[in-house]
Image: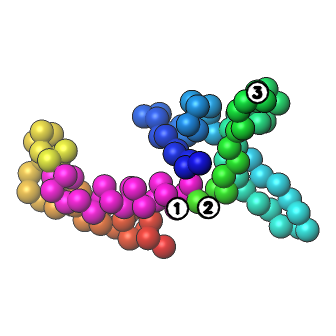
Amino acid sequence: MAQYIWLAPAGKLFDESGETLTPSHAVKSKRRYRYYVSRSLITGSVNQNEAGWRIPAAEIERSVATAARTILEDRAAVVTEVEPSGFDVRQTKSILDAASAWSSRLRS
């Protein structure tokens, strides 16, 4: 079964059934494992017909960083979004430089 993560405008993560994904962790042998877990698993209210998600945090964070990089690297789309604001050429170049810098940071 494929897992799809939905990003809401407020920056919250949801699983395929609309449950909020909440950051969580487990410690085993002094090592900390970070996860995003369906809310119903945390509250213990998961139905027998449903199985909540428990996804490694690195996997979600990598997906979000990749999506953000894709947006930031699309210079034409960035210009299209900032154009209505009336920025001059110098300001637009500064915005594109900042987008490029953030994209580089997200790559590492």
Disc 1 target residue = 62
Viewer-proximal residue, 63 or 89? 63
What amino acid is labelled 1 in the image? Arg
Q: Residue furthest right?
A: 29
Q: Is residue 100 left or right of residue 107?
A: left
Which kind of residue does numbered mark 3 sit on? Answer: Asn
SS for dot 2: helix
The answer to the question of whether label 1 and label 2 lie on touching residues, with beta carbons closer than 8 A, is: yes
Identify the amino acid type marked 2: Ala
Predominant SS of the magenta segment: helix
Label 1 to label 2, Cα distance in Å?
A: 6 Å
For disc 2, the neighbor class at 10 Å (few under 14, some 14 to 19, many from 20) is few
Relative height, residue 50 to residue 32 (above, below): above
List x then y, in percent, for residue 29: 91, 68
- Check whether the beta carbons of the residues at disc 3 and disc 2 lie within 8 A of each other: no
The residue positioned 62% from the left and 33% from the top of the image is: 20
Residue under label 2, please give it.
58
On the question of residue 105 being in view, the answer is yes
The range drawn in magenta is: 60-79
Q: Which residue corresponds to mark 3?
A: 47
Left or right of residue 45, residue 93 in this image: left
Residue for point 89% across, 67% down? 30
Image spot of residue 90 (x, y percent) = 12, 59
